Image (spheres, rainbow, N blue to C red):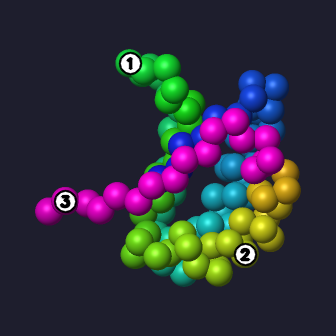
Amino acid sequence: MAQLSIPVELDVEFNEFYDSRYVPALLKVPGVRSAARYRLEWTDGDAMPEYLAVYEVDGADVPKTEAWRNASVDCGWAEAIRPHLATRRHAMFRRLP
């Protein structure tokens, strides 16, 4: 999962880029099964980023692969969006039986 915050003036550009370029690029990475995006509706804390992306992957190492990094670079994410992120958190969770 990734939690992200972006300055409000870049919100439209961020969402258009994420939906039209970033997610399609990541879905081509071997081992990526799905991607879902969420926007925060409410929180009981102050520091919760407003965006959440949840990726279903075949293994915990998939986001650390060269293919994942290349997808990020090739679609332009690294240059166009990443430098503007106010908050960027990543985590890997395992589904419980």
- Distance between mark 2 and mark 3 Cα atoms: 30 Å
The kind of residue on which mark 3 rests is: Leu
Counting residues from the start of the chain, the first of labels 2 and 1 encountered is: 1
- Of 64 and 16, which appears nearest the observer? 64
Left or right of 43? Residue 8 is right
Q: Residues within 10 Å of mark 2 (few under 14, many from 20)?
A: some
Residue identified by numbered label 3: 96
> What's the amino acid at mark 1?
Asp
Residue highlighted by disc 2: 70
Find the magenta span and give its range.
81-97
What's the mark number on residue 52?
none
Q: Is residue 29 visible?
A: no
Q: Is residue 44 above or below residue 59?
A: above
Front: mark 3 or 1: 1
Q: Secondary structure at mark 3?
A: loop
Report the residue at 54% width, 43% height from top.
3
Residue 80 point in image, percent of width and height: 84, 51
* Residue located at (52% from left, 26% from top): 47
The answer to whether marks 3 and 1 mark residues whose Cβ atoms lie closer than 8 Å is no
Q: Look at label 2 and name its amino acid.
A: Asn
